[in-house]
Image: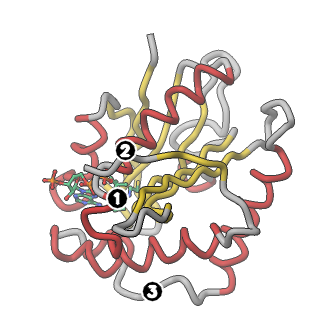
Amino acid sequence: MSTFTVRPASLATNDDAFLLECFDSQIKWLPSVGAGDQWGSEPVSGEPDTQNRYRKYVQTSQDGERQPWGEDSCRVYIAEANDQNGKAVPVAGLILTAKASDYVQSTIPAQDPTDPFIYMPLLISDREKGSLSKGAGVTLIEFAKKELVMLGFKRLCCDCWSGNERRLVQFYESKGFKALASFTHDGWPGQVLELRLE
Ligand SMILES: CC(C)(COP(=O)(O)OP(=O)(O)OC[C@H]1O[C@@H](n2cnc3c(N)ncnc32)[C@H](O)[C@@H]1OP(=O)(O)O)[C@@H](O)C(=O)NCCC(=O)NCCS
């Protein structure tokens, strides 16, 4: 398995575009594990709304890098691995936010002052990088746990698609997450999960 380094995302290194390349690569790959309905079959990297959304994530992350964590905070991180020429290349991305994603807010509150959490709206690897990216997602979960500790939190929440016999839910459960509530958004079956640090 590759050795990964994790760095904050930046617009200067086009990390917003990289995250969309990750989506395109996974949309091509997901049918091979029975998950073709997770994100549909069309590439998203050319969609202006999606481009804007991810540019905003990276911009907010960059702007807030040296600021304390607040109610609108967001951090975007990129995992890199060295290719066969020893060059560091991006292989996966992680987004952490102070609020739960809009579409789960009928399931869990945007934030819970009595049991605060950090939300993980995105964890994704670049399938085009082949074996170089293998394990990068798990590395980023470990990184997120350290970030949580640093920011004074003990709870990491996320959601994922629960179709395909819950294979993705099982992936998160195998990494220590526990299933909370399930939901359906526009016909898309989802599961909210949480990971608690001791
Ligand atoms: C989740 C992810 C970042 C983990 O990356 P990683 O640490 O390199 O781990 P892998 O890609 O090897 O995935 C681990 C296992 O989960 C499975 N898996 C990953 N995503 C899956 C999905 N969406 N549906 C079903 N199975 C999935 C893989 O097939 C693999 O199974 P295996 O161990 O039997 O080979 C990466 O697999 C990914 O980007 N998946 C697709 C996008 C996605 O669903 N992200 C989560 C959004 S909530």
| Amino acid type, callout 3 | Pro
- The crowd level at tag 2 (other Cα within 10 Å; few <14, some 14-19, many 20+) is some
Query: Do the residues bearing badges 1 and 2 touch, measured as CB atoms within 8 Å?
Result: yes
Q: Mark number for residue 189? A: 1
Q: Pick whichever of labels 1 and 3 is earlier in the sequence.
A: 3
Ligand 1 located in image quadrant: bottom left
Instruction: From the image, tell me which residue sits under label 2.
Output: 182
Residue that sits furthest to the front in the current view: 85
- What whole-number distance in Å separates the C-alpha atoms at marks 1 and 2? 7 Å
Is the CB–ligand 1 distance for label 2 below 8 Å?
no
Q: Nearer the viewer, residue 123 or 82?
A: 82
Residue positioned 72% across, 75% down in the render: 52
Q: Position of residue 105 (x, y in %)?
A: 59, 46
| Amino acid type, callout 1 | Pro
- The crowd level at tag 3 (other Cα within 10 Å; few <14, some 14-19, many 20+) is some
Residue positioned 34% across, 57% down in the render: 161
Instruction: From the image, tell me which residue sits under label 3.
Output: 43
Compared with 193, 39 (above or below) is below
